[in-house]
Image: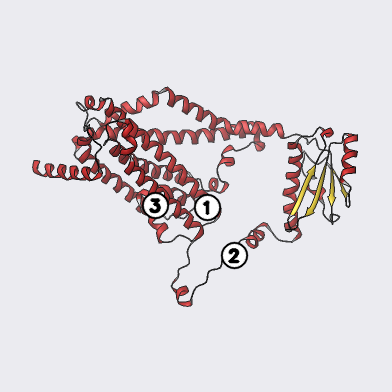
Amino acid sequence: MKKSDVRGFSKVFGFTLTQTLRAKSFVITMIIMAVFALGASPVMSALNKDKDKESPVEKVYVAGENISGIPFEDSVKNEENYSHITFSKQEGLDTEELEKKMAENKEKAVILKYEISEEGMYMLHAYYTAESKLDESDVSDVTELIKNWYSEYKVSSLNIDDETLKQISKDIKVKELEVEEFLKTDKPEIISQSEYMIVYALLFVAYMIIIMSANMVGTKVVEEKTNRIVEYLMTTVRPLALVLGKIVAMLLVTVGELLLLLISALSGKAIAKAIFGDKSVDALSKIVNADLLKTMSVGNILLGILIIGLGILIYALIAGLFSATVSKMEELQQGMKNFNIIMIASFIAAVVSSNMMWTVGINGFVKFTLYFPFTSVFVLPGSILIGKASAMMIIISLILMAVTACAVLFFVSLVYETIIVSNGAPISLKQMINIAKGSKKSAKEVK
């Protein structure tokens, strides 16, 4: 690729960026998303404050077998909004008679029926009457409180801590191996379920961002080619500068969107904290896995954005290349067929890799997807956040992505000028390779 191949890049970049930022649809969408991200925590905190009032439930009748030794009243005695509730244990209780009595007296009471199912499961049923003027949310708040307390009560009764409970509650997987086979087997590093959820969530987010950016570039290329705008632009701008200028502008817009949403969400969190203090609700923690928040350092976030940015560059270049092979908007799907194959195959490989991390362990295939540029963009960001990617792995992956981006860009520089002005049948990948070979040959002859 020669310097002259990107002549006019700054003009295309500036024009595309300006047009995108000035577009009413883009501005409205970004304002809505920013306001939503900014207001989520304050609004949720305000709603939570409204709920932060004394429960209308005044009494709980506890019915069931062998309940005399279970201190249900402990579930509410330390809760400010529920401590007024009184408990009455009724072993061998006639539920129908009590319901009739509650209805007559219009008691704001709940019958909590405790039993053990045939499967050995603890069952808690809550009943209330229409005359009590209670609604389902009033009762569910109390039952949720009791349920959470009961889980803690079982743990304390066993005289074990939460960590021990997690250990003894884990499933046991058995694998049979011959001695020789066992000696040859290295112990794989398996990630936890919460770590898997982090990797998978970021994998899906990266996929959505990249596919949307690539499709936007492809659509723009075909629109300009169909409207013959490209022929006018080529009088002052080199063909490669057209696609590269659009892609870099879109890349900058996408990264800017992510940073704006992140800043808005963090600002909203700070506003909620300033207004509501300790009772504020962090909307981000309600959406994002709690374990993910613990690993969200500025460095990790910037690395993730850099990796996704390189992924956008690679895939958008490919999308721009294949979309330029068609002459009509209705042929876009046909032109993007090879792009979709690459994209879907890489996405599936990344999904399989993340599943392997959780079920099998970090093996050779997983490491391959972390290094391979077309899949690392999906798997690597999550692996960085859970601490499963070493500094050397990150450096090598970034170098491979940068090299791939340069290689794709070099190929585009050889064929784009020819295919962008073609108006016949869609150009195949084989034809593009032949065009590239011809361009290289011509360049050598000129030298």
Q: Which residue is mark 1?
A: 195
Q: Residue at x 61, y 35 (%)?
A: 273
Residue 340, placed above or below residue 45: below
Residue 137, placed above or below residue 156: above
Q: Can you tell which of label 3 and label 1 is closer to the viewer?
A: 1
Q: Secondary structure at mark 2?
A: loop
Q: Residues within 10 Å of mark 1 (few under 14, many from 20)?
A: many
Residue 49, placed above or below residue 121: above
Residue 20 placement (x, y as % from top left): 38, 27
- Tell me: 397 left or right of 413: right
Q: Which residue is mark 3?
A: 394
Q: Can you tell which of label 1 and label 2 is closer to the viewer?
A: 2
Residue 170 visible from this viewpoint: yes
Tell me whether the residue at label 3 lies in contact with that at label 2, contact meaning CB atoms closer than 8 angstroms: no
Q: Which residue is mark 2?
A: 172
**Separation of marks 3 and 2 at Cα, in angstroms:** 33 Å
| Residue 4 circle label | none
Depth check, front residue: 23 or 110: 110
The quadrant the C terminus occupies is: top left
Q: Residues within 10 Å of mark 2 (few under 14, many from 20)?
A: few
Q: Earlier in the sequence, mark 1 or mark 2?
A: 2
Quadrant hosting residue 158: bottom right
**Separation of marks 1 and 2 at Cα, in angstroms:** 19 Å
- Tell me: 8 left or right of 54: left
Q: Earlier in the sequence, mark 3 or mark 2?
A: 2
Depth check, front residue: 31 or 297: 31
Q: Can you tell which of label 3 and label 2 is closer to the viewer?
A: 2
Residue 55 placement (x, y as % from top left): 78, 36
Residue 408, placed above or below residue 5: below
